[in-house]
């Protein structure tokens, strides 16, 4: 453990190097990135500030704060859970233990449906979005931030998650166009929407124990567990969507990389033809879009 003198003399770059060595020795996959992100996030500086830093020593409290966060990362707590927030599609989203950490792959879902939301907003002056299992509100809030005449409702079975989503709406200045509903799937949902989106639980129950500790131990299990075959959520959405979707509307869902064929079959059996499949930046199947004839 560094002594008090070393702590007093620590600089930003020295702490990045220290953390990076610790993370690499522990076998963490992105030691340098994690170290920089933690130091910048905890000290509220940009990467540019870090690069241009002249080596001024940090005070002991700042140094201890960074080293305490490093100890948490060594226990495999994700970097952005330590920081308490994560950037998603240009929004700074607060995280909580009850919400899934939004990841870059899910931005694919937003990008895939954004043209439809924009077009409908131009044509009709509005677009009504229902986000099933909203969690932090990431997907719905990203769409509302991009399209000023869109409105959204986020549902979740977790009251605590809905509180986080409402907090994120306030942080983004979107509260007037975003509301929430505590509901399992469509139970308690009222109204008709133009777009239904969801990043639902899709991990087969038997696979959860084998996930990386960052996911298995820190994301809420209810946001991961998709049932025996990982497809329970898609069945529920496909069965219930028709009542709440306007003619000509769309349903868009994120999927696991090997689930496109099975999910397509579920929705088409419920009379929702698949109109598009979208890959993420890694080239994996990630999003499916279905239409309601009309």
Image (cartoon, helix red, strand yellow):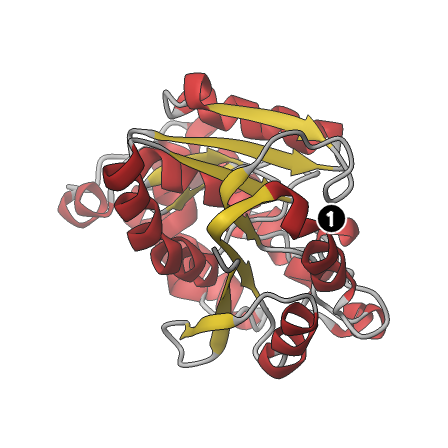
Q: Nearer the viewer, residue 219 or 59?
A: 219
Q: Position of residue 205 (x, y in %)?
A: 83, 68
Q: From the viewer's perspective, is 49 left or right of 268? A: left
Residue identified by numbered label 1: 220
Q: Residue at x 67, y 28 (%)?
A: 181
Q: Position of residue 57 (x, y in %)?
A: 29, 34
The quadrant holding residue 25 is bottom right
Query: Can you say whether 204 is above or below 244 in the image?
Result: below
Q: How many marks?
A: 1
Q: Residue furthest front?
A: 294
Q: In this orientation, does residue 4 appear?
A: no
Q: Residue at x 85, y 74 (%)?
A: 206
Q: From the viewer's perspective, is 119 left or right of 76? A: left
Callout 1: 10 Å neighbours few (<14), some, many (20+)? Answer: some
Query: Can you say whether 195 is above or below 174 in the image?
Result: below
Q: Nearer the viewer, residue 233 or 100?
A: 233
Q: Residue furthest top?
A: 176
The quadrant holding residue 236 is bottom right
Q: In this orientation, does residue 145 appear?
A: yes
Q: Nearer the viewer, residue 60 or 277?
A: 277
């Amino acid at each position: 453990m560094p002594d008090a003198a070393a702590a007093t003399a620590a600089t930003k770059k020295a702490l990045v190097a220290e953390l990076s060595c610790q993370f690499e020795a522990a076998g963490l996959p992105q030691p340098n990135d994690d170290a920089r992100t933690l130091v910048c996030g905890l000290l509220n500086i940009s990467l540019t500030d870090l690069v241009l830093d002249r080596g001024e020593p940090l005070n002991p409290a700042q140094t201890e704060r960074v080293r305490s966060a490093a100890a948490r990362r060594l226990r495999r707590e994700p970097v952005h859970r330590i920081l308490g927030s994560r950037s998603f599609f240009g929004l700074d989203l607060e995280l909580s233990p009850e919400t899934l950490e939004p990841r870059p792959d899910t931005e694919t879902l937003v990008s895939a449906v954004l043209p439809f939301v924009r077009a409908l907003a131009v044509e009709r002056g509005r677009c009504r979005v229902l986000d099933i299992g909203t969690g932090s509100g990431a997907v719905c809030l990203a769409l509302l931030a991009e399209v000023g005449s869109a409105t959204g409702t986020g549902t979740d079975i977790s009251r605590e998650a809905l509180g986080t989503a409402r907090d994120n709406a306030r942080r983004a200045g979107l509260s007037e166009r975003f509301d929430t509903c505590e509901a399992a799937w469509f139970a308690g949902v009222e109204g008709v929407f133009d777009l239904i989106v969801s990043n639902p639980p899709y991990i087969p129950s038997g696979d959860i124990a084998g996930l990386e500790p960052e996911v298995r131990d820190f994301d809420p299990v209810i946001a991961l567990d998709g049932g025996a075959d990982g497809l329970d959520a898609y069945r529920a959405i496909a069965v219930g969507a028709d009542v709440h979707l306007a003619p000509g509307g769309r349903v868009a869902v994120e999927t696991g990389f090997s689930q496109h064929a099975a999910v397509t079959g579920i929705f088409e059996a419920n009379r929702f033809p698949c109109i598009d499949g979208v890959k993420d930046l890694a080239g994996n199947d990630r999003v499916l879009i279905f239409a309601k004839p009309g």
